[in-house]
Amino acid sequence: MNELARELNSTLEGSVAYGFLSSVGKRMYFPKGITAQSAEAGEKAKTYNATVGLATSKGQPMHLGDIMGLFREGVFKPSEIFNYAPGGGDKTLRAIWKEEMVRKNPSLAGKPTSGCLVSAGLTHAISMIATLFVDEGDVVVLPDLFWDNYDLIFSELRGARIVTFPFFDGDGFNVEGMKKTLMDQDGDHVRLMLNFPNNPTGYTPTRREMDAIVKAIVEVADSGRKVMVISDDAYFGLFFEPETASESLFAYLADAHENIFAIKGDGATKEDMVWGFRIGFVTYASKGLDKAQLAALENKTLGMIRCTVSNCDRPGQSMLVHAYREGENVQADKARTFEEMRRRYRRIHQAIASHPQTLLRAYPFNSGYFMAFDTTGHSAEQLRRHLLDDYGIGTVNIMDRTLRLAYCSVEEESLEDLVDKVYKAAEELWS
Ligand SMILES: Cc1ncc(COP(=O)(O)O)c(C=O)c1O
């Protein structure tokens, strides 16, 4: 094992995170190689800096004018578009994201967390977390309605075993089922992944449910188990009901218990409507992690970034910093999008309420971009095909028992018709 990895491990030993480290996680470190040396040279090499593999002229990267011309003249320096971004992301972007994270999650105020490291989108963030903290044969506990990429990441990439519990108990989140499933696992390290607003259901726990989730996880931690909780906050902020919890689970778990290791994956991709920019973030916290240990986790994540994508999209980061810092319409544009999504949410709720919940039963939903139907024992794939072939309507089948509608991409005035047709198609097939 590399000496640097050994050092990081000895820093982490005895902490809540240490026992979760996979074999890759244990081997991981950020090498003192080219990037570390060129960062150092950037500070100190005042005459020539011959470290970075990048063609520069007059201190700026050389570039294709045709590409630069795509951006409005005078807005960016070439270095803000064409340079490599630093390994963990643009420092200003990271600082703004962290500040915003606390503003959006007031319960985080004063709680120590790692810095927010930039990933190449949230998928990359989750994949890195899985590589660092999940080994072959480990169990990852999930509610049974989850984003399908988790399967690919945890089961296929990492060789882990996904164990699920029913997402809903009646109309609410199944807190007891979650707790029981965590308690039922063998071993003293359990891993839990939760995603709110949820894909595919569009459900976020109410404030009371969120309190109950935190209490349940603390009880599991009290039993002596170490609990790693990954919060996937991809659709954070799109909460449409006043009783819905509007802070991330991460904010409550960050200092809840020495045995709880909280990880937050989030991203500008959806929150700030820059899907194609591929900019996500990873943040760590625990009552059981001191400053040096949080820094060691950051370093391991830097190593993961380095060996997967090297560094992340530079133009996107510069554009975000520019928009956050100087943009006059960022908040207004976000608010306008939120209002539009809320109108669609209300409209589709009304449309669904006018149909009997027999062949298709809508799962509870209150947030995000989606809603989903339980196809009550019938084939969701059959319905998806029928809608596509005979109505020209595209929907998503999940595990042949759930049909997902992304109402975020259908105009408000078309939602009633969409819902009518989905119910009609189900009747044609199954009644
Ligand atoms: C629940 C969930 N998490 C993560 C992601 C990944 O987001 P990104 O585009 O930033 O990789 C998605 C994207 O669809 C998602 O639905």
Image: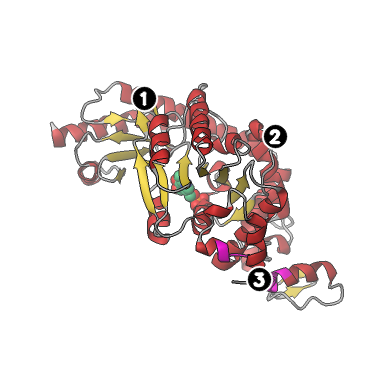
Q: Is mark 1 within 8 Å of ligand 1?
A: no
Q: Which mark is residue 3?
A: 3
Q: Quadrant of residue 331?
A: top right
On the image, numbered disc 1 is attached to which residue? 171
Q: Is residue 390 visible?
A: no
Q: Look at label 2 and name its amino acid.
A: Ala
Q: Is residue 8 visible?
A: yes
Q: Which mark is residue 400?
A: none
First to last magenta residue range: 26-36
Residue 156: x percent and y percent?
38, 59
Quarter of the image with the C terminus is top left
Q: Nearer the viewer, residue 240 or 190?
A: 190
Q: Look at label 3 and name its amino acid.
A: Glu
Q: Are marks 1 and 3 in contact (CB under 8 Å)?
A: no
Mark 1 vs mark 3, foreground winner is: 3
How far apart are labels 1 and 3 at the CA level? 52 Å
Q: Look at label 1 and name its amino acid.
A: Asp
On the image, numbered disc 2 is attached to which residue? 109
Outermost residue to the right? 47
How far apart are labels 2 and 1 at the CA level? 32 Å
Residue 171: x percent and y percent?
36, 25
Q: Which SS class for mark 2? A: loop
- Colouring: secondary structure
